[in-house]
Image: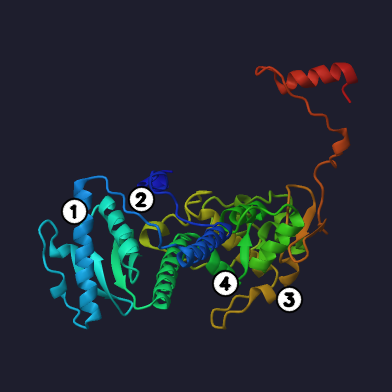
Amino acid sequence: MNFLAKYQFDFNACIHEGISYLSRAQEAEALSKLSSAYENELTNSANTSQENLEIPIVSTADLLFTERIKNRFHEWRNGIMKNSYTDHYLKEEPGCVTSQFQTVFFKMRPAIELNGFNSHQMKLIQLVLRKQFKDLVFIGTPGEEVVFEKKVVYTDSEEDKALLMREVLEDLHRSKEARVRSAVGLRHVIDCLVSEQKLIVGHNCFLDIAHVYSKFFGPLPSSIMEFALSVHENFPNIVDTMHLLNSSHALQYLMKKSSKSLSSAFSLLCPEVSSYSVKSAHASYVKFEIQADEAGSSNWTSGAKHEAGFDAFMTGCLFAQECAHLGIKFDLSLPLTNLAANEKLKDYINLLYPSWNSGIVIDLTTGIEKPESNYKRKYPTVLFSNIVLLWGFLSKFKPKDLKDCITKVFGAS
């Protein structure tokens, strides 16, 4: 928290603005709804009846307005049909300025752009057009800042009108699709990782991957096998540094009985970059070169676990050191190699721990769980048939009190 505050991190931004992203499932749902709405709009535009549309006159002002609008559109259309289409046919009249009717072209057709009318007047204009002008079409198109521009477009036939409506609906559909895709936001980072198909490195990362999946792909599948296969489809190469520590005899020897937690493994295997490291008997260290801005570079070796990406830094260093102990050499003078295909590493890839201290790994390529080959159980096997769940105790009731009660009844053993 202190680190983030020091560099002016806005803790309220996610509350005020939110973190913009859509999961794949959300994006697919939004696009599906758009497509369905688009098909409905196409059907409705083709089947809209032009008959029996009465103009509701609620006041004298409405009557005068509709008559004036009708006369102006008659004048404009007649000018078009006489091939003398100019602004001359939109002369200024009392109470209606010329700027409200701007002559334009829309999709290679003569049109009028309507400005300065309120919503009630726009509705009256639409009703006048439907009642009096079968060859004039009212169109709303998205403009700047999601404001719809209103136009009246001249069409020379029913076929031309149908074509115009289809073109307009296609434009609206594309505009809405673009807005949905722009809302993908942070998920673009995940999409880039998927498209690159590079090796993903984590430490005891099964839950991390499940969290990423639920946020950026969609709801978690109903079975662990389905989940594993779906993860493998998107991330074909994942390696768990904790699984490496437990499976490699060379790394087990180095770790001895030390904790396999990320911070402990980092301090033991990467002492030259760990500020809280312990002395180690081996001296085969990989040299790390980190590129960072001035603000962040001073904190790469701060030893601050779970702060500002330092866990990711520790995981990367740990993985590089593990690779070195497996005999994988990093030579900057040689072209980059595909680590996932390395003979010394490939047997450790796509094997993750689905739960803590179970001795079980899941193979992401098959979705099958299997015992870990070198697993040494520290605790007795849990027999779920012997487990009893008790609840409803008072808040002040302590575990020691429960143990005393059970001991009195069943004995200390």
Task: State the residue position of label 3.
Answer: 343
Please report the residue visible at 54 percent of the width from the left and 66 percent of the height from the top: 191
Task: State the residue position of label 2.
Answer: 7
Q: Is 66 in front, or is 384? A: 66
Please report the residue visible at 34 percent of the width from the left and 75 percent of the height from the top: 155
When the figure is inspected, residue 396 is found, relative to residue 247, above or below; the finding is above
Q: CA distance from mark 1 to mark 2?
A: 64 Å
Q: Residues within 10 Å of mark 2 (few under 14, many from 20)?
A: few
Q: CA distance from mark 1 to mark 3?
A: 86 Å
Q: Which of pointers 4 and 3 lies earlier in the amino acid sequence? A: 4
Q: Which of pointers 1 and 3 lies earlier in the amino acid sequence? A: 1
Task: State the residue position of label 4.
Answer: 195
Q: CA distance from mark 4 to mark 1?
A: 63 Å
Amino acid at dot 4: Ser
Determine whether, in the image, residue 253 is placed left or right of residue 140: right
Which quadrant of the rendered structure holds the N terminus? top left
Q: Is 268 in front, or is 389? A: 389
Residue 4 visible somewhere in the drawing: yes
